[in-house]
Image (cartoon, helix red, strand yellow):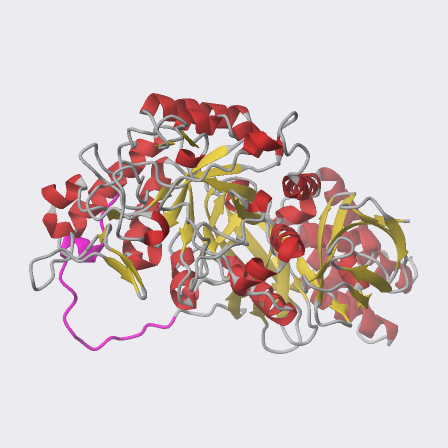
Amino acid sequence: MSALPPSVRGVPASPNRRTIVVQRPLGRIPVGNVQPQVEGGQFPAVAVVDEEFTISAEVFREGHDAVNATVVLTDPTGAEHHYAMTCTNVGLSRWEAVVCADRVGPWTYRVEGWSDSYATWDHDATIKVAADVDTQLMLEEGARVLERAVSEVDRPERSQLLLREAIERLRNKSLPTAERLGAGTAPEVHRELTARPLRDMVSPSPEYGLRVERHRALYGAWYEFFPRSEGCHLDEGTGKWVTGTLRTAAARLPAVARMGFDVIYLTPIHPIGQTNRKGPNNSLDADPDDPGSPYAIGSEHGGHDAIEPTLGTFADFDAFVAEAERLGLEVALDLALQCSPDHPWVHEHPEWFTTRADGSIAYAENPPKKYQDIYPLNFDNDPAGIYAEVRRVVEVWISHGVKLFRVDNPHTKPVEFWQWLIADVAESHPDVIWLAEAFTRPAMMAMLAKVGFQQSYTYYAWRNQKWELEEYCRELAGTAAAYMRPSFWPTTHDILTPYMQYGGPAAWKIRAAVAATLVPTYGIYAGYELLESVPRPGVEEQIDNEKYQFKNRRWEDYEPGGPREGQLWMADYLARINEIRRLHPALHWLRNLRFHSADDENVIVYSKRRLVGAQDDTIIVVANLDPHTTRETWVHLDMPALGLDWQAGFVAKDLITGNSWQWGQHNFVRVGREGEPVHIIHVRRF
């Protein structure tokens, strides 16, 4: 276990004293404003293996000599990878390079500015020789620059021969002057000096951290269910509920896999307390047979390192994980750091909780919501003890095959705790991924990502208008992409927005398709296939919330031979969306999102493009965000963003319906209730 933060170890703060700021020497070639930077380099930027992203900087020098710049990525082994930068606003000193990392681990990056002696000579010689000014001197200086390029930079033998031949011709006074100059400025010489430049006065920026992780940290389709509901039923004899188990939940996994999901996310599976157990719809009147909230963790059967006995045993859990892996699914487990009044921690470590003036332990509240069945942890009295115990618990589940944790309400725990925990786990388990369920203030949501959470729930559920989706997603795919990866969920077991309550089937299609194509990671809560849209009065959540009771969705009725065979059309729609995502790598990435325009303010248009070698995958999405009306409008495409000339045409194939059209820059579309509300279009070039 790595060292605890100073505040946890009890290290006293430094005494107040005047701080002297020491400036970092610039170097001969100034390099400034390196981007991305996360909190000025305090935290690493993030990427996944083979994810392309842009590093930029301002690089300049005094006078008129040419400067150039290089990005240097250093991999976990210490090997350096150089990327040539390009000046993107000639004369204004902004340099950029698109880079990517090829393996998981801690990387660093820096930008090196340098004097470009060859470019300086090329520029000056071209002008002076044409004007017959210092002609012989300029040709000799060119030969000397190329001699240095041969002797000071490692090159293949054929490249050395190329440059030596150019040197000989530059000095060969029997040749015409234009031919001598042309030998030193030939395209092949330019290419060689670009690939392996002669770099003088190299001036590096500071090193910045880059955390590179596996692709699942960025891309995946999640499916959430409550294990106790999968296979639950009413006993005809007793009229009482019979709980589902981990074994019956495993029987649901093939259906989830058939829909094309990548991750199966389980709400807490730990023992549930009896004290203040909640009844249906969060009531305080629980019957003895009510299952209680799985977020009220802990009973005489154990706490966070145990399994609710009615669900099964660790052998059953291992069998569940094995079945998920067989079907290509990863298992994500809810980590909810809170306790029922019956949790062993309450009795063994009462100092881990907040005691009120009357001697009672404070229960959780999120006004107007009250959770009398839950005690939140207080990290201030014995942080070292809590840190160590949570780390032990996490290791238990990792040892049983869990590599993803969906963390409940992380914004109610100290941020430095998450920074320590995630880093400590990563030392021995770098493939573990953490999803923050933090519907909270933007600053807190961002900081949780900066300290290590690979993914974050977002405000997507409440962003319904075109302008607000575009504004939000430009932020997420732009500056925020350096540290935060969004996960879009149309609904959760706690969220059912008015858009979903009243939008009808079109709303459920729109929100799923847009979530799945705007960002690489999205999630669906079980019951989405059934359009479960009836709210509990006064709140944005479903009536008969599954947190407090069993829910038998009778999936078997929709199977072949069942009374509702063939009626589960939303499951087929989700399966098609996930198939499109899987087949089109453009949808696996975040930073490649580009918006286009439409005349109708209710129609959103965006694209994603992934170019790898000769393979060009481009997807355009046209979505009518108004679930109540069919819309007809013109859409206007930014053709260069699609890799096409402004006047080019292409075949637009709708991957939902299979229809194809001839498209160009301006196109008429019809989307809405009377047809498909979303076009997911594959660009086929002529």
Q: Is residue 20 magenta?
A: yes
Quadrant of the drawing holding the N terminus: top left
Question: Which of the pair 28/76 is nearer the observer?
Answer: 76
Q: Is residue 123 above or below residue 188?
A: below
Task: Estimate the x, y position of residue 510 in percent, counting from the top left.
Answer: 66, 55
Q: Residue at x 84, y 71 (%)?
A: 129
Question: Which of the pair 493/220 is nearer the observer?
Answer: 493
Q: Is residue 237 above or below residue 78?
A: above
Q: Is residue 161 visible?
A: yes
User: What stretch of residues is rendered in magenta?
Assistant: 1-23
Q: Residue at x 38, y 36 (%)?
A: 429
Task: Estimate the x, y position of residue 454 in percent, counting from the top left.
Answer: 45, 49
Q: Is residue 200 visible?
A: no
Residue found at the far front of this picture = 237
Q: Residue at x 46, y 23 (%)?
A: 322
Q: Is residue 204 above or below residue 219?
A: below
Q: Is residue 373 left or right of residue 45?
A: left
Task: Estimate the x, y position of residue 446 in percent, counting from the top left.
Answer: 43, 62
Question: Which of the pair 622/135 is nearer the observer?
Answer: 622
